[in-house]
Amino acid sequence: IMIIIDHPWQESFNHALLDAFVEELKKNHHKIDVLDLKKDGFDPRMTAEELALYGEGKFLDPKVGEYQQRIMQADHLVFLFPIWWQVMPATLKGFLDKVLLHNWAFVDAKPQPIGKLTHIQGATVITTSGVSNGYYSFVYHNALKSTFLKGTLRFCGITNARWVNFGKVGEVSQETRCKWVNEVRGIARRLTDIPPVMYK
């Protein structure tokens, strides 16, 4: 199980959720690979030189090759991050841009590209947001669902995905936060039993 987290503050609620998730997985003896993008010093910027190689599925940043190898060894991907400006933070966006390369994560085909990461049995996306779930759904139409779950994961062949968001994270009580931590522990315990959610 590969967990990818993007949050700059180690004392954040996102990291508390990460700790709880990992602790629960260890109880069930899962093999865990945690990638903290900020801690790892990943540079999300796409240079002109890198873009010139994109069409060939090549890269210059050695971390890209390392991350690709780690993804290839994973059965399940977990993404943990705050929703900023209705989508993921810049470092995770750059990770997707630079790592999910043409001819590696997908190939061109007609009538539509074909995802190649079909060895991934599923993905779990855990997010936090400053607005409520209802507001995010009504006003922004659950933007992350179309941009990330459909437009990225499904595009690359990962069709079994689950997303849970904890809204108004800056305003809720400590009791609510504890409840959410326990909910994340439950997700970790049930990880292998998550039913597939097919996004069409």
Image (tube, grey):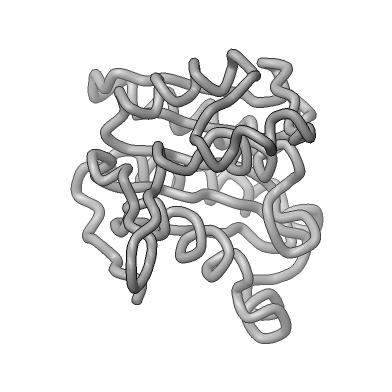
- Quadrant (top left, top right, bottom left, bottom right) of the C terminus: bottom left
Q: In this view, does 8 lie to the left or right of 151?
A: right
Residue 140 image offset from top left, x and y in percent:
70, 78
Q: Can residue 120 be seen? A: yes
Q: Can residue 162 be seen? A: no
Residue at 38 percent across and 61 percent down: it is: 113
Residue at 45 percent across and 44 percent down: it is: 184
Residue 191 image offset from top left, x and y in percent:
28, 43
In the displayed structure, 35 sits above or below 91; it is: above
Q: Give the quarter of the image for residue 28.
A: top left
In the displayed structure, 140 sits above or below 146; it is: below
Q: Give the quarter of the image for residue 10.
A: top right
Q: Give the quarter of the image for residue 12.
A: top right
Residue at 34 percent across and 52 percent down: it is: 115
Residue 26 image offset from top left, x and y in percent:
33, 20
Q: In this view, does 139 lie to the left or right of 158?
A: right
Residue at 32 percent across and 57 percent down: it is: 114
Badge count: 0
